[in-house]
Amino acid sequence: MKVYFYALMAMSLITTQINADESSPESAENVEEVEVTASILNPSRIINPLYVIDGSEIEDDATTSLGEAVDSYLGVSIADYGAAVGQPIIRGMSGPRVKILKNGMVNRDVSGLGVDHLNDIDLNDIEQIEIVKGPSSLLYANGTIGGIINVVDNCIAEGNYDKQEFIAGLETQSVNDGDVQHLNYKNNIAGFNVNFGYKNSEFGNFDIPDGAVMHDEDHEGHDEHEEEEELSYIENSDLEIESTKFGISRAGAWGYFGVSVDNLESIYGIPYHGEHGDEHGDEHDDHDDDHGDDHDDDDHGDEHEGERIFSTTDSESLTVKGLYNLNGNLVNSVTYNYRDTDYTLTEAHAEEEGHDEHEEEGHEEHAPTVFSNDATEYGAIFDLSNDNFIQKISLNFVDEDSSIVGEEAFMNPANNEEFTIGYFMSADLDNFYIDAGFRIDQIDRTGSVTDEDHGDIDYYSIDDDTNSFALSLGRDLSDSLDVNFGFSSVERLPSVIELFMNGPHMATGRLETGNPNLNSETSNNFDITFNFDNGDFYAYASFYINDVDNYITLMDELDDHDDHDDDHGDEHGDDDHDDDHGDDHGDDDHDDHDDYSNLIHADYVQEDAEFRGYEFEIGRTFSLGSGDLTLSFGRDDVNAEFSDGHNVPRINPSRNIYSLSYVENDWKFKLSLKDVEKQDDIGEGESVTDSYQMLNTRLTKTFNLNGAGELKVSIFGSNLLDEVARNHSSFVKKQVPLAGRNYGAKFSYKF
């Protein structure tokens, strides 16, 4: 592995010296291709469903999680777990079906190992966020049945900086007493592009509207819950993040070469933990009285009273990236990349001040649980384009080790190796234009499952190839109207969690069991998109059907737990597990964690599913005074059902988004209303989620300080109606609602 890294370094250094004085007009085009359009095919046209969010939109708004930053865009929502965690959902798809990329490479954190794990990615000084919806995003990563979100920060500059730039900023928020500071520096020093960034964010517990937290009816009137119901904030919902990044690059007509190092550390509270006996999962009070009573055991209700549960993360990554212009008859250029990531997340318990009496009563101290992910990835893209076609071949290799060690470990260490060969083509023909992508992924996932009864370990190696392709066909119907058709077939191998999960998962309040015999998912997606734009009026509409064979989901067992003990292994079809998994859920091995027997039993199972949905938006721009006023209305909707007719769980409801924006010289004003409808198309074991309206606004003014720099001031507000709101997709929607009214300001000085 190190041989490849050193080879890339040597090749870059040699080409830097040999070609430093050469020139090529195609170099700028290649740079712009990645930075501006997010397409590895065509820098001038994207026919896939795509959003490109300018970095200033993130810079001017409140500091939030990645998911919350993109939640207002059609087809994109989040599954939150408090303010710190906002894992994105695209067209109803979540988890491993949506890949988060950092500068075109998958961000290798442990967000896929738990719904209470954040997407640890730095949003400081970013160029843009690119969202590709649907399976056509296979052009960028494997298994992306839902899509990708690529965060581009240009830390490795692909072109030379033309001037020095220094930015310092401050931010404050009311809902969590938030305080943020950041600074950034860019300059070309002796021919080298230097990029440095630092950001520190501190947020306390966030406020909520009165009555936002829901409790079981059985506990109404109990003295121990009266104080909790009166709380105006969510305990353990605080967040601190400190991020640092440094990049250096050299660019010229020959191409570019650069290295970046970044570090991100965070600490955040976990506002819900499944060991609490009063509620084990938000959606199961409606099944039957017996099931509810199992979870409302007063013996467990106070187990974590006065205890702080929190996670700390530490991420370090080294990235090498470059492009070399060959200008040959066959290969025009080679783009190459390398990244080494070392990531850890530690979940710990700590007694809060004034609660030492727990130790006297025999309260057991919990040992920390450490989630880690060490990954190495490298690859290359060969540009074979000619006058008639844009053609590229990509090679990529990933070696990833995941482990969970500690008291609440629910999976043995696992390894994931992937080797990819892809071919991508784009052509602009007389009557239509076409994009096509094909990829073959050779994947080897190895792991094990422990037999809790006898201590035996069963080892597994899932070695398989996945084949995927995407085809997009577009046609201009007039100067202002075009139509695009897309068809994709994407195969996804089960993740290590879906394969090897075997134990209590407190974040979901469930005792979860994976299945090493799961088959790969295959998504067959068709979509049609219309775009109209005549300058003043624009309209967009997209309709899609996504048939997923062998869709993998975490399915709750709704009957009494003991009824499943004997046949639990049979559900997985593996004789090695016939007796193991059933006994795991209720035997003496869990004596040290008595309330594990009260957790909801859930299994990773497969069933064919169909996702149907649409997105549309209309807007009009008017000249008003010396500025432009734009009004728009958009709506998105997704319905997901299994082949037997019941609903796929945790699908967010339809949304209507109204927006108004006004731009005049150095003034920008935005007002948006997100109307989220009631979700009553629920899966088994789920409860109905009420509708809510989220009103947000932002006013930004830029002051030119007569050559002494530029001062930008933004005043923002969110949930101005102070609505009680909760995400249907959240495992903790009852216990952890969305934040209440928030207002704040940002100040940024640039010179």
Image: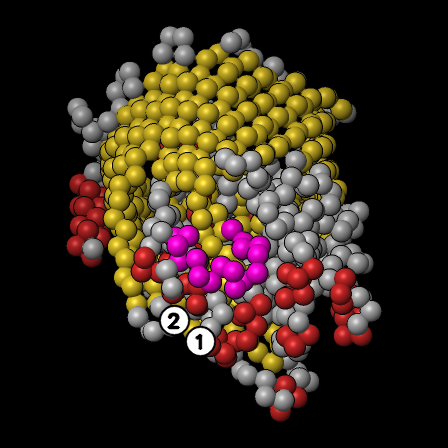
Location of mark 1 (residue): 589
Residue 118 at x, y percent in the picture:
52, 57
Q: Is residue 436 visible?
A: yes
Q: Label 1, label 2: how many angstroms apart (C-alpha)?
A: 7 Å
Decide whether residue 364 is among the magenta residues: no
Find disc 2 in the rendering and name its residue: 452
Q: Nearer the viewer, residue 146 or 99?
A: 146
Quadrant housing residue 551: top left
Tell whether 137 sits left or right of 86: left
Q: Residue at x 63, y 89 (%)?
A: 361
**Is 719 situated left or right of 472 in this image?**
right
Crowd tier of the residue under label 1, counting other residues whose Cα lies within 10 Å: few below 14, some 14–19, many 20 or above: few
Q: Is residue 617 left or right of residue 315?
A: right
Which mark, by number, is residue 661? none
Asked if the residue at tag 2 contacts the one at tag 1, i.e. Cβ–Cβ closer than 8 Å, the answer is yes
Image: magenta residue range: 555-572
Q: Quadrant of the N terminus?
A: bottom left
In the image, what residue type sits under mark 2? Answer: Glu
